[in-house]
Image: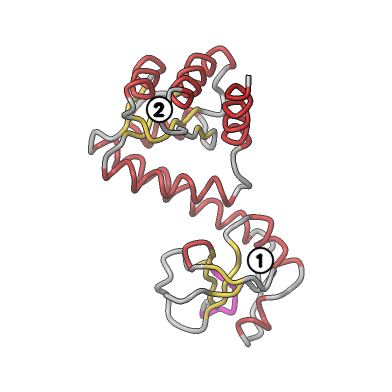
Amino acid sequence: MNDRTCIVTRDSAPPEALLRFVAAPDGTVVPDLKRRLPGRGCWVTARRDRVDQAVRRKLFPRALKAPVTAPEELGAQVDALLARAALGALGLARKGAAVALGATKVEAAVRSGKARAVLHALEASDNGLRRIDQARRAVARQGGPIIPAFKLFSAAELGLALGGTNVIHAAVLDRDAGAAALKRVVRLDTYRGGTPDNRTTLAANAAEDLE
């Protein structure tokens, strides 16, 4: 598909970097995450703040050329849909043996180069994070990949998706099912504004290289 234009910023970008919205039969604006719904659509940069701006500035009626109403909770609706898609993909990855659970297995997956990303529950303690973060930095310093870490879900949410009671740490492994799940995790993370931890890791590695 050709690039599309965000109705908020007026910048052009590939469809994968944007969210499509259409008018429902009842005249409300609804997200079309799979870009398959019929009718005229409009596009917004795939970030929560941009969706909220589009609602607040009442940009959807003009973009859709219809007297539509965008609910105030549209940004939250999109967040919930993206989270559901990410958790569903993680569940499929788990069934395909593309997810490791538990701090010990996650650290081993990171150090062995099998991990593509790490997931920490929102409740994860600093002590629980430290060993895994040290492993991530060590791999990067040795010329391995920068392994991103995300804190997007509660332990209960991860547990429900991944088949555990409460999951605190998980690793997405370097397999096809893992790649598909990671794509959805990154999309949710981007929508929520990005993960500061990943930027901190990059900066820390760069600083250590200069010492």
Residue sticking out furthest to the right = 57
Q: Nearer the viewer, mark 1 or mark 2?
A: 2
Please tell me in which quadrant of the rendered image residue 161 appears.
top left
Residue 157 vs residue 11: left or right? left
Q: Residue at x 60, y 29 (%)?
A: 206
Name the element at disc 1. Answer: loop
Q: Residue at x 72, y 63 (%)?
A: 53
Residue 111 bears which disc, if any? Answer: none
- Residue of label 1: 71
Q: Residue at x 76, y 70 (%)?
A: 57
Residue sticking out furthest to the left = 96
**Quarter containing the C terminus:** top right
Residue 181 vs residue 150: left or right? left
- The dominant secondary structure in magenta is loop
Q: Position of residue 85 (x, y in %)?
A: 42, 51
User: From the viewer's perspective, is residue 66 above or below residue 111?
Assistant: below
Q: Amino acid at mark 2?
A: Ala
* Nearer to me, 180 or 141: 141
Q: Position of residue 142 (x, y in %)?
A: 43, 23
Q: Which residues are magenta?
A: 25-30
- Residue of label 2: 170
